[in-house]
Amino acid sequence: MDALWAPWRMEYIEAEKDRAKEEECVFCGILALADDENGLVIHRGKKAAVILNRFPYNNGHIMVMPLRHIAKLEDLNDEEVMELHYLACKSLKALSDAMEPHGFNMGFNLGNVAGAGVKDHLHLHIVPRWQGDTNFMPVLAETKVMPDHLINTLRKLKAAFSDAIVQK
């Protein structure tokens, strides 16, 4: 039998155990870091930020979130709503320019039963998709093949995001 190693999964599994013990929100911790590359932060706005998902569903999987620790969409103030939507639009432009996906999945997972891994800090997932990006690996081997390193993806998206913001 052949073995396919996916060591990043162990980091995710162990981090999940640690997150259950932690009182601090993982997103608040990332946003508090001064090192954006280590935190995989693509862009910081006045009321919201865009970060690359450390455990992506697909290459280029990003999340748009308010800077404020808030769980409910309906509790956002008007400025947060506007900036979240603005950054979601600019994220689509940056992802399109940098990665040329054929489509996107976007959504909020609100609550545990909806699949929220981090349920207390609202975040919008934006997942680029390509024709044929699903293959036998996730189905048969429960392994996702990521074609690019997170730091390379981060650098591409930061540059494209800067361009998208300037183009307004």
Image (cartoon, rainbow, N blue to C red):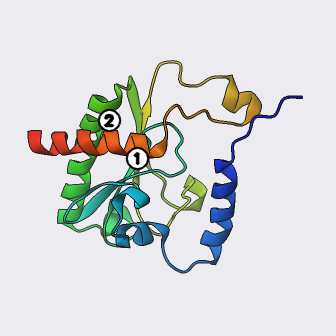
Q: Which residue is most to the top?
A: 132
Q: Looking at numbered disc 1 in the image, what kind of residue is underneath it?
A: Ile
Q: Residues within 10 Å of mark 2 (few under 14, many from 20)?
A: many
Pinpoint residue 106: horizontal percent, then vertical percent: 40, 41
Q: Is 113 left or right of 130, judged from the image as shown?
A: right
Rendered position, 45 above or below 1? below
Residue for point 75% across, 34% down: 4
Q: Residue at x 72, y 37 (%)?
A: 142
Q: Is residue 78 left or right of residue 136?
A: left
Q: Quadrant of the C terminus?
A: top left
Dividing the picture into quadrants, the one containing residue 153 is top left
Q: Position of residue 53 (x, y in %)?
A: 46, 50
Hey, which residue is sitting farthest bottom in the picture?
Answer: 23
Residue 95: mark in rendering:
2
User: Circle 1 — which element?
Assistant: strand
Which structural element holds mark 2?
helix
Q: Please say if 113 is above or below 151.
A: below
Q: Position of residue 119 (x, y in %)?
A: 51, 65
User: Few, some or many C-alpha atoms within 10 Å of disc 1 (few <14, some 14-19, many ≥20)?
Assistant: many
Q: Residue 127: x, y in percent? A: 43, 39
From the viewer's side, name the closer residue of 101 and 88: 101
Q: Quadrant of residue 141?
A: top right
Name the residue type under label 2.
Leu
Q: Which mark is residue 62?
A: 1
> Circles 1 and 2: CB distance less than 8 Å?
yes
